[in-house]
Amino acid sequence: MRILTWNINGIRTIPQYHPWNTMKTHDDILNLLKADIICFQEMKSSRANLPKAVGIPPSYHSFFSFPIKKSGYSGVAVYSKLDAAVPCKAEEGLTGRLQPKPPLSTSERVSVPDAYPDEVLADDGANFDFASLDSEGRALVVDFGLFVLVNVYCPNDGTETEERLQYKMDFHRMLEARVKGLIEVEKREVIVVGDLNACAAVIDHAEGNLMVTRGQAEGMQGEDGFWERDVRRWLRSWLVSDEPGNTGRLVDVVRRIWPERKGMYTCWNTKISARESNYGTRIDYILVTPGLLPWIKAADIQPEIKGSDHCPVYIDLHEEIPHPTGEGTIKLRDVLGVSAGTEPPRIAAKFWDEYKQRLLDTFFGRKAEPGSKVSVLPYRTTPLPDTTPSTPSAAPEPAAILPAVSTSTLVEAANPLGTDQHVSQSQPLPSSLSTSVSKRKREPQEPAASSSKKPKADKQKLKKTGQTSLASFFSKPKPDLDPSPSSSSQTKTSKSESKSEASPPPSSPVLHSIDADYQFALSLSQSQKSSSASPSRSNGESKKAWSSLLAPLEPPLCQVHGEPTKELTVNKPGPNKGKNFFICSRPVGPGYDRGKAERLREEVDPTWRCDFFKWSSEVRLEMARKRGG
């Protein structure tokens, strides 16, 4: 059995990468991860905007926690495979205060009241705002019988306001108190998974050694330069280690299996392409209580899996282990969760009102009669209307399948320009479309000459309908030879009808392109005649100027390595968005030159990227000066 955790950096980000972009459904994506319990962090969505395919995939029970106020921020999810692990209980948040409607009963709650943070920290003397700490959708607690799983996304470890820094430390203490209550009060085994946003050791940071060296240069002892940040010291104290006086409660499983492995990073800065050179940090963990170690079969990271600025981390559990008494074995399926086919806890997404309402609506929905035409609207990623079928499938679900009561619905479904352009049911169809549809049902057309002898009533009806074809809308008007308005209109109508049926319209793509080419050739010949009177010197200067303007830029050489640089584009919103610039083409790494303001000169390693920077506009001006001089 496999438990996997992954900070996906947005549920809509994964399908943009290979091989996820080849998957037809979210269920296929989950299956390709090949795990029985999947924990996501940074969903960056909300309950209202969660697609149904993501909310209730057919092969999994699903649980979510989203921010109460901020939409598209944070958010965690737990998926458990139907035939592998059905949770006994589940709760949103760490405090037990985030309750569904109606609230969970005592038997439905994961823990007894004394095991929650407010009781565990009651004697601490600190004033915690538990409602605020649990309002950002950062945790799910799921009871699988053998262990209690805590999926958590800790606040980012960065330099922010004092208020935010206090929030981070309070959240860490709340998380630690929740785990402490489970272990000490309820005597439970615990697995904590997720993005803790902190490094547990010097080896877990690409620049860990540089931090140690810098601290020693400032008079610090040992590795104190690395442990300056409070969050790192907190995580170190929470983990079991061989250090004297250690009181840690959890084991870092991946590091336990790979104690000396370097470069085992799980997060990279994609803005500087740090993943290419493995310049990253290890901040994603699977931590277990010591009592679960006999069940651990394997643990590792999966840096080869793309789709986020993080990579997945997993552990594998044995299917069975020897009984502590030495008699027989304990099978995992006998102690994990409840039996397959049992309903999941009530906070599962399948019990959400919006999904239950859809199931009820489709039960009473009108079915299409046999042989009737139906229109299929394009697939949507937003929550579907109440007419969505309830039966899940492995293929992408259309937004709706409804009886085609009008041809305008068909036009709307076939509209290649998007959903912004609609044809209302009260409006007539374009004459070109209506004519093409009606022609299939009529008898073979009469000769083109007979079209000019149609009754006058038909001509007036044709005027009300509009243009006879889309091509005629773009045709050029012809001079009126008959001064009589009535005769002129009749003549134009008959001519346009005969031309549309007997020959290609004058504004068809082929003829239109020929006409445009002819006009361009005519203007070019006139310009050549006018330029023949000017001196040849001006022509040469003009050609030289255009060549200089349109010539591709030659990448300048970086000053440190003397190598051609690479050109990038500013994507960050602001006055420089869209501008191009050149930087050193070497990858980033420990000690790469981030500039004098951020990197001491003695710490710079010339093996990696230097601080070369130049705007592309400056490079073009320099090229123009060289050619002009």
Image: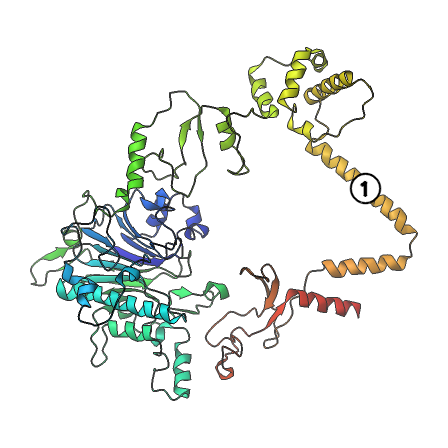
Q: Nearer the viewer, residue 536 or 347?
A: 347
The answer to whether residue 506 of the structure is visible from this angle is: yes
Name the spot of residue 600 as percent of width and height, x first. 49, 82
Farthest residue toward the right? 533
Identify the residue shown where x is 44% and y is 69%: 279
Q: Is residue 554 left or right of residue 313?
A: right
Q: Nearer the viewer, residue 52 or 204?
A: 52
| Three-letter code for the amino acid on which mark 1 is drawn | Ala
Farthest residue toward the bottom? 219
* Coloration of the structure image: rainbow
Q: Classify 100 as above or below 480.
A: below
The residue tagged with tag 1: helix, strand or loop? helix
Q: The C terminus lies in which quarter of the figure?
A: bottom right
Q: Classify 487 as above or below 472.
A: above
Determine which residue is flagged by label 1: 521
Residue 590 location, quadrant: bottom left
Identify the residue shown where x is 55% and y is 74%: 610
Name the spot of residue 89 as percent of width and height, x first. 19, 51
Name the spot of residue 420 as percent of width and height, x first. 52, 38
Q: Is residue 568 left or right of residue 533?
A: left
> Counting other residues with Cα less than 10 Å from the Cα at mark 1, is it few (<14), some (14-19), or many (20 or more)?
few
